[in-house]
Image (cartoon, rainbow, N blue to C red):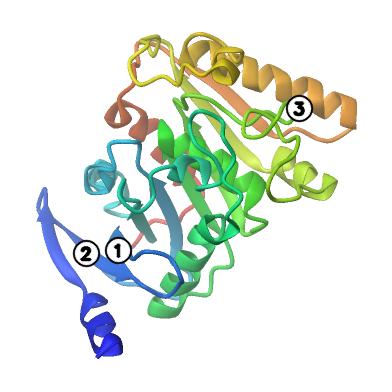
């Protein structure tokens, strides 16, 4: 009976938004709570179709985030997928369930979701018989927190490119206690992982007007990173530069302040799309 219910849950349900079809599937192939994945596909899928994951903010509105991508991918050979981490099941998804916003570490490794996107990617590859061996990620706000921590702690080197936008706070590559730094991280982080993290193609974006204090983590550790999201983004990038120099590692991150942009994923999405779709083929 359980297998039958799971089979029903994995049926694809079409949702129509802005005259484009968004599909939905329930991912149940792991030992965590089920995750709804919304996705859009090109008219024809082939072995060379690419994959981008869009990670929502703390509002958990994955469908809205995905809808904002529709005008940018109409002629692109790409599947864009947006998993939805519910507050009930994944309250601290932006910390990969490894800690709380207060900084208290969760020692129950069974809760961790640092393999989530990797499993979702495997499922999509299998479902559509894709040949691609890499995927890209875009995260905004809490989704940006998720994205940079996922890159650092997932051990999945298939992430080829990412955009981290308007994060509220960060995990610095410093000797500060996790999750503010990497000291006593619940998962061991090797020097090779840090080297890969720094050398990957990452675009760190921050809106110049994202200076409000609403929903900004005000814990002591977060406040030490800066008072506003703008301050914290600048300090994070500066810290990466110093850290890379001290370690002798290449830093291939790009930092950009977006003029007249506030904490709005709809305003950020065109910039993220331009970056992540740059090398994806048009559909003839």
- Between 203 and 96, the residue placed more toward the observer is 96
Q: Is mark 2 on a helix, strand or loop?
A: strand
- Write down the residue under mark 3: 174
User: Is residue 147 placed above or below 116 in the rendered structure?
Assistant: above
User: Is residue 38 placed above or below 226 in the rendered structure?
Assistant: below
- Write down the residue under mark 1: 41
Residue 235 drawn at (x, y percent): 63, 15
Q: Sequence order check: which comes first, mark 2 or mark 3? A: 2
- The quadrant of the rendering that contains the N terminus is bottom left
Q: Which residue is drawn at 35% across and 61% down?
A: 283
Q: Which residue is drawn at 54% across and 40% down?
A: 99
C-alpha distance separating marks 2 and 3:
41 Å
Q: What mark, if any, has residue 23 been given in the picture?
A: 2
- The quadrant of the rendering that contains the C terminus is bottom left
Nearest to viewer (mark 2 / mark 1)? 2
Residue 139 drawn at (x, y percent): 44, 39
C-alpha distance separating marks 3 and 1:
40 Å
Q: In this view, does 270 lie to the left or right of 143?
A: left
- Between 163 and 90, the residue placed more toward the observer is 90
Crowding near the residue tagged with mark 3, few <14, some 14–19, many ≥20 C-alpha atoms within 10 Å: some
């Amino acid at each position: 009976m359980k297998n039958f219910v799971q089979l029903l849950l994995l049926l694809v349900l079409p949702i129509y938004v802005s005259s484009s079809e968004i599909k939905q599937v329930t991912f149940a192939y792991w030992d965590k709570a089920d995750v709804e994945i919304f996705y859009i596909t090109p008219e024809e899928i082939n072995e060379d179709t690419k994959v981008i994951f869009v990670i929502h903010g703390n509002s958990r509105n994955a469908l809205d985030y995905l809808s904002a991508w529709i005008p940018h991918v109409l002629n692109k050979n790409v599947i864009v997928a947006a998993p939805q981490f519910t507050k009930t099941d994944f309250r601290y998804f932006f910390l990969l369930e490894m800690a709380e916003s207060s900084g208290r570490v969760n020692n129950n490794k069974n809760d961790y979701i640092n393999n989530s996107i990797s499993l979702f990617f495997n499922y999509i590859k299998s479902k559509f018989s894709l040949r691609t061996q890499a995927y890209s990620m875009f995260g905004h706000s809490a989704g940006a927190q998720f994205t940079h921590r996922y890159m650092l702690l997932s051990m999945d080197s298939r992430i080829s490119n990412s955009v981290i936008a308007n994060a509220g706070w960060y995990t610095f590559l410093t000797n500060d206690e996790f999750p503010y730094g990497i000291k006593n991280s619940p998962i061991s982080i090797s020097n090779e992982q840090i080297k890969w993290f720094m050398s990957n193609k990452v675009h760190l974006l921050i809106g110049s007007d994202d200076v409000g204090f609403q929903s900004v983590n005000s814990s002591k550790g977060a406040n030490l990173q800066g008072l506003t999201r703008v301050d914290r983004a600048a300090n994070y990038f500066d810290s990466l530069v110093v850290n890379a120099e001290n370690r002798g590692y290449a830093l291939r991150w790009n930092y950009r302040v977006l003029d007249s942009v506030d904490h709005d994923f709809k305003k950020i999405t065109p910039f993220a799309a331009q970056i992540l779709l740059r090398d994806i083929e048009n559909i003839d």
